[in-house]
Amino acid sequence: MTGNAILFWAFAIGVIAGLRSLTAPAAVAWAAHRQWLTLAGTPLAFMGSLPALIIFVLLAIGELIADKLPATPSRTAPVGLGARIVTGALSGACVAAGAGRSLPLGALLGAVGGVVGAFAGYEARTLTVKALGVKDYFVAVAEDIVAIGAAVLILFRS
């Protein structure tokens, strides 16, 4: 895959982090652990370890549950947005590193993707709930499915 395509996928995995902050690094850890994403010999090799995989998957499951609770703050609030920037950066750097590209550039693109995904996801979810007249819970579950499916697709293509 060309260098520019890899940079697109680094941005795209960041967008997934914007939707669900922990789905992107959990998917990256899974791909690295299964050696679909080669991080050996990079500073991000730890993402392929079993402990990293377990931690990120458990955190992602917890986030999927917590997202449905009424007291969960908005993804665009400072703490949620900050988390999406950090996990987008980590995930984008992993995608770039897996293709032998620049970690800082991958991190930057992943972080920008995290911001884009957070605000676009918020708007899409809000508008969908209003347009369909359904409970937020149902749209949130659909968003979970999209985030997980897109993360897997991104990692298979990158």
Image (cartoon, rainbow, N blue to C red):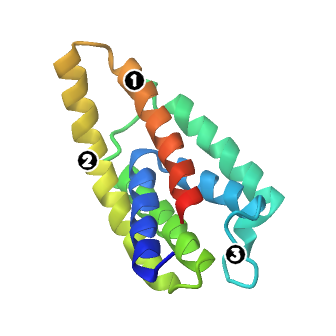
Residue under label 3: 39
When asked about the image quadrant of residue 116, the answer is bottom left
> Going from the N terminus, do you reach mark 2 or mark 3 first?
3
Ranked by sequence position, the earlier of labels 2 and 1 is 1
Characterize the local packing of mark 1: few (<14), some (14-19) or many (20 or more) Cα atoms within 10 angstroms: few
User: Is mark 2 in CB contact (under 8 Å) with mark 1?
Assistant: no
**Side (left or right) of 6 relative to 18:** right
Task: Check disc 3 and give the amino acid type.
Answer: Leu
Task: Report the front residue among 66 and 18.
Answer: 18
Count every numbered label the image shows and give the total. 3
Disc 2 target residue: 120
Evaluate whether residue 22 shows in this view: no
Residue on which disc 1 sits:
70
The structure residue drawn at horizontal position 53% and vertical position 68%, both measured from the top left corner, is 90
Measured from the top left, where is residue 113 in percent x and y?
35, 62
Viewport quadrant of the C terminus: bottom right
Q: Residue at horizontal 19%, vertical 30%? A: 127
Q: Which residue lies most toward the front here? A: 1
Q: Secondary structure at mark 3?
A: loop
